[in-house]
Image: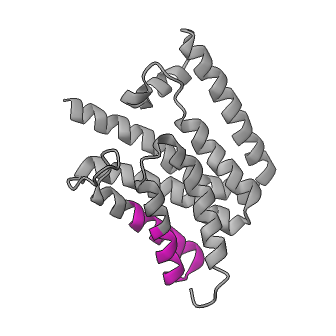
Amino acid sequence: MKVRISLIKEIFRKSIHLCSGFVPLLLFYAFWPTIILLICAIIFYSICEFLRLKGHVVPLISVITETAARKRDEDRFVLGPVTLALGILIAALYLPFEHAEVGIFALAFGDGCASLVGKMIGRVKIPHMGGKTLEGCLGCFTAVFLTTLAVSHRPLLSLLTALLTMLIEVLPLFDFDNLLIPICTGLFYGYISGFPFF
């Protein structure tokens, strides 16, 4: 029963990750309104979390936060949504669009698939990595490879980008992988895409 509840929570939490895959589309058609929306979301969510910790229930937001919170986040500020939006925001503001797109897709689909695959079929635990699994890593790698390939149409570039993202995702960074994946993946993609043989 506990495993099932944990899986449902993970699916709910990662559905938010997967929805962030729509952000590049919004950025393409309405860049500044999307940026402003991300900033407002960070501020609004942070206020709601502080109120929740003070014992004030914020309709809908508090329920979503408590439903999605991991065990380690109980009675604490749930940082995941802030680092998720902040990672996307920084990538969008400071990276060229294509590089930011790759980084955001890596976060949305790579990190999202890593957790879901790891929870659903993960068997081989990676030592000293906070319970992460080989199957989850391969899920991340596959998702990032495919999304990067869809953007770049360059298999070797996509392979290397997926490898880097997988290495970041497997580290026990807790919610800070949300911050690092879009920025580091986008930067790395931008750097190596300048080499024609990739």
Q: Which residue lies at the image location 46% right of the left edge and 76% below the top edge?
A: 159
Q: Which residue lies at the image location 38% right of the left edge and 54% below the top edge?
A: 114
Is 97 in front, or is 23? 97
Q: Which residue lies at the image location 44% right of the left edge and 27% below the top edge?
A: 73
Residue 129, relative to residue 157: is it above or below?
A: above
Q: Which residue lies at the image location 69% right of the left edge and 48% below the top edge?
A: 89
- Of all residues shown, which one is farthest toward the bottom? 197
Quadrant that contains the C terminus:
bottom right
**Residue 149 counted in the magenta span:** yes
Residue 144: x, y in percent? 47, 65
Quadrant that contains the N terminus:
top left
Q: Main secondary structure of the magenta part?
A: helix
Residue 183: x, y in percent? 63, 57
Whether residue 48 can be seen here: yes
**Residue 104 counted in the magenta span:** no
Is 88 in front, or is 8? 88
Whether residue 29 can be seen here: no
In the rendered view, does 125 fall on the left or right side of 150?
left
Residue 29, relative to residue 164: is it above or below?
A: above
Residue 109, relative to residue 5: is it above or below?
A: below
Residue 132: x, y in percent? 32, 50
